């Protein structure tokens, strides 16, 4: 992150933590990975309150802390190569972009006791001392402070390192309002790599164990935030940090900014925009349910992540944070127990690359979606029919994501005439088939698509006719069938609703009228079906023209099941252009709802239930 608007713009975490420094006098903490050994924290040290605390108070004078530079600041120009440093500075500064009009401006304020700064010495920045932001989190140990992983890496090799709650610029360590707390031990996921742009940037979290000062343990002195895991990316939060910038923050005061977060596409990270987040804010808390008077709330993230917490353009108004999941919780549990982190498996994002290839403008052309176990893997894949007639298979990986796409048909004029599609196991082979209704009323079954592909004529279920031109939507399910997905729901243009059971090759089986023609069901814009109630019989989900979303639980040949309201009428869901349901997470239930929105954004709602949407995952990010 840029350290000053008039200085060279660099990423929030530009690698100084990887440099060597003198061995620590207090603790070794975690050794950075790279030698093939599993890093381990040092054994707990005796209490530092007393002689060592006094040493830290003497060492950290007001001037020494004022002269410290952010851990994510650019390295100074060296005497050996000043021209190269100046060239880097010029190119970085030239890349800075103005913030979009309307970007939020932060508030400078006096800070809160549970949020402060870490100061640590070292050679990582040309001999300069460094700092970053941290916050006390509630634990039984009452001595744990959260920061970014790359800040923790910067402290690993330091001789002098302290946490200063509610830091006051111009005061020495001994004169700080809540005292200072020496850092005893650091806990960093051994799989984390500093300032990387790789998936392990999701692990940019560190916990510091701090010793008591003469006022007590850290949490008893300052209070604490509540560490909170989440599976969502959209939050209303307040982000706090201590930026260093001579031109906009000469007093080194805390800033806070109310933000709305979204997912950083491709990562288990949140993104927010707010002006003024220059170097020094790394490790700062992202707080949900924030109380501005007390500073309390639920901490759901910390500034850090991809590239140390900022984008490739080093814009000070774009900031990232890891999303706290099981990995972060496990690390906190280790820190609270003051124990060495256990062996971790190779890092793999929990969502396992869930995103689909291509930008949102491309996905605006995803005309029709169908899901099913096309490859006999035990979980679903997704077929997309594009507006130019191309047909693509996206193999599910069983973990909510997709492997490399597979083209079933190149762009062609024939498949431009596909009007509505669905997938079921109509051939009874335990491999899903694709059923297509064409613009001329013909209906064709393509059996075992995963192995046969689409380069064959398929089985004509019904010749071109005027009746089936009025079949507006079709949705396969297991409404009556015991084993295979062989039932077909049809919504006709006049509002009639028909269920065909025991559909097979060349036959629509038995017909059951569920609704006579009516005006209400003319407004049923999209249909899908799935095991939302968890009882192995499928439900029918309907998106209406006004954006309302309903689920009909227990639909059978006797009629529609009980209506469960998922969403009331709303503007957002009027933009749902296509939807399908599959078992993309491999839990054995077809309950993962995929939505393609009008702007091309594509979203999966994992484990959707009969009366509520599941956990939201972004598959294709919006353009803005």
Image (cartoon, grey):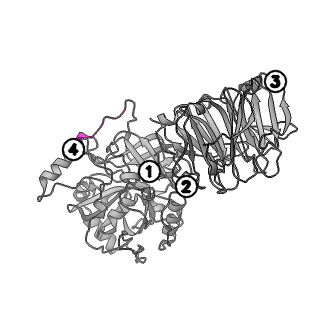
The answer to whether residue 179 is visible is: no
Q: Do labels 2 and 1 touch, CB within 8 Å? A: no
Q: Residues within 10 Å of mark 3 (few under 14, many from 20)?
A: some
Q: Secondary structure at mark 1?
A: strand
> Mark number for residue 257?
none
Q: Earlier in the sequence, mark 1 or mark 4?
A: 4
Q: Residues within 10 Å of mark 1 (few under 14, many from 20)?
A: many
Q: Secondary structure at mark 4?
A: helix
Q: Which residue is mark 2?
A: 229
Q: Nearer the viewer, residue 202 or 121?
A: 202
Horizontal side of 76 relative to 142 (left or right) equals left
Mark 3 against mark 4, which lies toward the viewer? Answer: 3
Q: Secondary structure at mark 2?
A: loop
Q: Which residue is mark 3?
A: 517
Q: Which residue is mark 1?
A: 321
How far apart are the alpha carbons under marks 2 and 4?
Answer: 39 Å
């Amino acid at each position: 992150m840029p350290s000053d608007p008039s200085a060279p713009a660099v990423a929030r975490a530009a690698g100084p933590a990887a440099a060597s420094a003198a061995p620590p006098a207090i603790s070794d903490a975690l050794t950075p990975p790279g030698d093939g050994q599993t890093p381990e924290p040092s054994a707990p040290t005796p209490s530092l309150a007393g002689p060592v605390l006094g040493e830290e108070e003497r060492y950290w004078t007001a001037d020494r802390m004022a002269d410290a530079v952010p851990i994510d600041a650019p390295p100074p120009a060296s005497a050996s190569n000043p021209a190269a440093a100046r060239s880097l500075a010029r190119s970085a500064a030239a890349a800075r972009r103005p913030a979009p009009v309307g970007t939020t401006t932060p508030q400078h304020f006096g800070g809160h006791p549970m949020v402060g700064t870490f100061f640590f010495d070292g050679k990582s920045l040309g001999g300069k001392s460094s700092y970053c932001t941290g916050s006390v989190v509630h634990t039984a140990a009452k001595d744990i402070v959260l920061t970014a992983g790359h800040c923790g890496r910067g402290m690993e090799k330091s001789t002098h390192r302290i946490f200063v709650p509610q830091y006051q610029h111009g005061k020495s360590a001994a004169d700080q309002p809540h005292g200072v707390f020496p850092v005893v031990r650091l806990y960093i996921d051994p799989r984390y790599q500093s300032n990387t742009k790789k998936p392990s940037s999701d692990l940019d979290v560190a916990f510091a164990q701090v010793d008591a000062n003469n006022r007590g343990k850290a949490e008893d002195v300052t209070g604490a935030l509540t560490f909170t895991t989440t599976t969502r990316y959209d939050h209303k939060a307040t982000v706090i940090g201590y930026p260093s910038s001579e031109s906009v923050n000469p007093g080194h005061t805390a800033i806070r900014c109310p933000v709305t977060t979204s997912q950083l596409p491709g990562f288990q990270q949140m993104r927010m925009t707010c002006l003024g987040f220059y170097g020094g804010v790394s490790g700062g808390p992202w707080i949900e349910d924030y109380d501005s008077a007390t500073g309390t709330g639920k901490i759901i993230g910390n500034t850090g992540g991809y590239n140390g917490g900022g984008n490739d353009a080093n814009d000070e108004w774009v900031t990232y944070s890891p999303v706290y999941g099981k990995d972060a919780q496990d690390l906190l549990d280790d820190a609270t127990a003051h124990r060495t982190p256990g062996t971790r498996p190779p890092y793999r994002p929990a969502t396992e690359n869930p995103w689909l290839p291509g930008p949102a403008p491309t996905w605006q052309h995803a005309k029709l979606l169908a899901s099913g176990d096309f490859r006999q893997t035990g979980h679903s894949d997704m077929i997309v029919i594009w507006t130019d007639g191309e047909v693509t298979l996206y193999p599910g990986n069983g973990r909510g994501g997709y492997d490399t796409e597979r083209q079933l048909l190149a762009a062609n004029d024939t498949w431009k005439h596909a009007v509505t599609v669905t997938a079921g196991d109509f051939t009874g082979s335990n491999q899903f088939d694709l059923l297509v209704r064409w613009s001329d009323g013909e209906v064709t079954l393509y059996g075992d698509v995963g192995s046969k592909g689409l380069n064959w004529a398929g089985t004509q279920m019904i010749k071109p006719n005027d009746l089936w031109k009025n079949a507006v939507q079709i949705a396969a399910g297991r409404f009556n069938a015991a084993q295979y997905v062989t039932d077909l729901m049809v919504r006709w243009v006049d509002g009639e609703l028909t269920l065909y059971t025991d559909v097979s090759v060349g036959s629509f089986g038995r017909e059951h009228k569920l609704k006579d023609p009516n005006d209400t069901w003319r407004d049923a814009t999209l249909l899908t079906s799935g095991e939302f109630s968890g009882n192995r019989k499928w439900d029918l989900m309907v998106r209406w023209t006004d954006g309302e979303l309903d689920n009909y639980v227990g639909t059978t040949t006797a009629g529609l099941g009980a209506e469960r309201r998922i969403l009331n009428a709303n503007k957002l869901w009027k933009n749902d252009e296509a939807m399908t349901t599959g078992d993309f997470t491999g839990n054995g239930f077809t309950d993962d709802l995929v939505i393609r929105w009008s702007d091309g954004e594509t979203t999966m709602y994992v484990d959707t239930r009969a009366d509520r949407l599941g956990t939201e995952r972004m598959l294709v990010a919006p353009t803005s």
